[in-house]
Every structure is written in C-alpha cells, then in structure tokens.
Amino acid sequence: MTGKLYNTLKGKTQEIPPVWLMRQAGRYLPEYLKTRGDAGSFLDLCYTPSFATEVTLQPIRRFGFDAAILFSDILVVPHALGQDLQFAQNHGPQLGPLPDLTNLDFEQFHVNLSAVYDAVSSIRAQLDKEGFSNTDMIGFSGAPWTLACYMIDGKGTKDFNETRVFALSNPQKFQTLIDLLTKLISEYLVNQINHGANIVQIFDSWSGVLPPDQFRKWVIEPTKKIVAHIKHFKPETPVIGFPKGAAFLYEEYATHTGIDGIGIDTQVPPEYAAQTLQKHCAVQGNLDPMTLRAGGEELEIQTKKILETLGKGRHIFNLGHGIDKDTPPAHVEQVLKLIRG
C-alpha cells in the first residue's frame, strides 16, 4: 500500500501536502533518548534491527507523519567497506584511514549491511502491525561525493579541503572511488527497496562545497547513474535527491539526474522553488530548523509562507536540514496543526 508522499512523488498535487522531517527520529524526543541509552552506542542503535525499528516508529506514533525513514547513518557504507568508524561524544564521526578497495568482496559488503536490510523489513512489518499501512517507508544512502568526503577527510569539516585537493590532484584515483561508491550505493538502495522501502532518498550533504564543473562531475553524474540503476530494477520506486547547498545548480540537478523529488535547503527561496523546480519534479522542504526550534509567531509565519508558495504544486513539507536536538516536540505539533488544520 502506498501513501500521500508516494503519490505526490508520482505526480499528484495534494490539497494538504504530505509531511515528514529529516532526523524526525532523534534526540529531541525523550523516548528516543531512552532507547538510545538502552542500545549502548549509536552504532549499536543502527545495527540492532529491534532498536532501529523502535526509534523509527516513535515519531510516527507521536505525530503521525506521512513517512517513516529508516533509522541508520550514511556512514554505514564506508564502515561496510572496512573503514574504521567511531562516533565520539560531541565530536561527530571519526573515520580511520581509507581502506584498500582494490580487491573488494562485493558479497561481503552486503553481508556487512544485513542488519540494515533486516531493519527495513522489520520497520515495514511493524508499521503495518501498528496500523500505519498508509505510511510510506523511506530508505536512504549518502551520495558518492558526500561519502568520499568523509572517507578521505576522516571526519566532518567545514569545507572538506583534503577531499577536494585529492580529487583535483588524483582525478583517476578519485574517479575510481566515486565509480565504486556509485555501484555499491545503487545496489544498497535496491536492496532496501527489496526489503520494504517504497521510496529512497540520496543525501548529498556536502555538494555545496563544489564549484559548478566539479558539481556536475562528482554530484550530478554519479546521482544520474544511481537513479538509472534504481529505475531499471525498480521502475515504480520514486527517488528524492537532496543536494544541500546546490544554490544556482538546483535546477540542473533536478533536470539532469532523473529524480522524482528534490529536497531544498533553508537558503532556497520558496518562490524560486515554485517557479523553477516544481515544473520538473516534486519539491521537498524547506522550513528552517532554527525557526522550528524557536517556535512562536515566526514559526507560524514561515510555515504558512511555505505552504502558500509551494502548495499550488507538488510539495512535500519538510525542513531545509535535520531537526535540531533542542527542538521542543510541542513545536512540531504546532507545525503539523498548521499544515493539516
């Protein structure tokens, strides 16, 4: 069974747009903090299907969002490739040296991700069991460029200079890495669909650090290949792309990759998205997470503005980035009341 989000991505304009929020399962929810404590570590939370299922469903039970998104992390892909991965308290992800990928065991890569596939199956089953059959299920992956940034820089940085210099100094070597990631991400997403996801999203969180020619080479081209692979094996599955920070290149990304929906970040004017992007695909976004955290009158003004500007076309209400951990759950309720009121 498919829901409102799926139908919007398939071309249907809804009177009340579907809504879900990036990082809707997270530290702003007291029930998440409890489960996170029970799990022991963040990676244990991701790799234990029962825990991943529980935290994925928590915001669905509380808010009735139109979609559940797999609880995992984009960095499980480099981890499955044999790169050391740790999440240090208050320091974000720390990755070890780039592993030797010349004789990669492709079968083992998917075995290493079997807990993620099991989580997708478990989440879909639990949604149906708890009466959320109409709730869409989103699978996801990081995009090749963004994953390469973490794999080479070894952590989150402001501009990923090491990766950018590596890509320019070793273009052939870097192309080999991007091609490998493109192949594996394509398979990873198809496997998630096979296990119960009926929509997938590609997060290119660091696409905004690239100049136009490199954006085309390292963001648009690999994404186009991933989408083509998904459409070949799973033609009915819609794909959302989120090239955060793409600025003037949003339209080129929307028209050249084959995506069905485009996630827009906080800095994209809704007017621009309505005039330029909505004619190509569904637009997802783009309330500022800090406005959501602050609440009050400004939250009401900005929510209404987005609804009025994007509501005449295919629109998925979301944030321009992930929900902040200090957001009061009551502010999420306030937004949902405005959207559905």
Image (tube, rainbow, N blue to C red):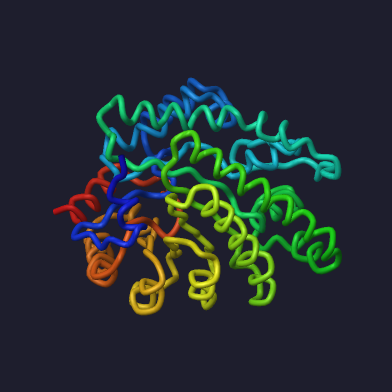
Q: Is residue 207 above or below residue 116?
A: below
User: Which residue is found at the position 50% from the left and 25% from the top?
Assistant: 49
Q: Is residue 153 above or below residue 115?
A: below
Left or right: 189, with 293 as reference point = right
Residue 104, picture quadrant: top right
Residue 276, picture quadrant: bottom left
Residue 73 percent across, percent down from the top left = 56, 41
Q: Quadrant of the N terminus?
A: top left
Q: Is residue 281 above or below residue 333?
A: below
Left or right: 40, with 99 as reference point = left
User: Which residue is found at the position 44% from the left and 63% from the top?
Assistant: 262
Residue 30 percent across, percent down from the top left = 36, 31
Left or right: 54, with 94 as reference point = left
Residue 328 percent across, percent down from the top left = 32, 44
Residue 16, picture quadrant: bottom left
User: Which residue is found at the position 59% from the left and 31% from the top?
Assistant: 43
Q: Is residue 249 above or below residue 148?
A: below
Q: Residue furthest top?
A: 38
Judging depth in this view, the residue of 115 and 152 nearest the camera is 115
Residue 77 percent across, percent down from the top left = 65, 41
Left or right: 298, with 236 as reference point = left
How many badges with numbers are in the image?
0
Q: Quadrant of the C terminus?
A: bottom left
User: Which residue is found at the position 25% from the left and 67% from the top?
Assistant: 311
Judging depth in this view, the residue of 85 and 65 nearest the camera is 65
Q: Residue furthest left?
A: 341
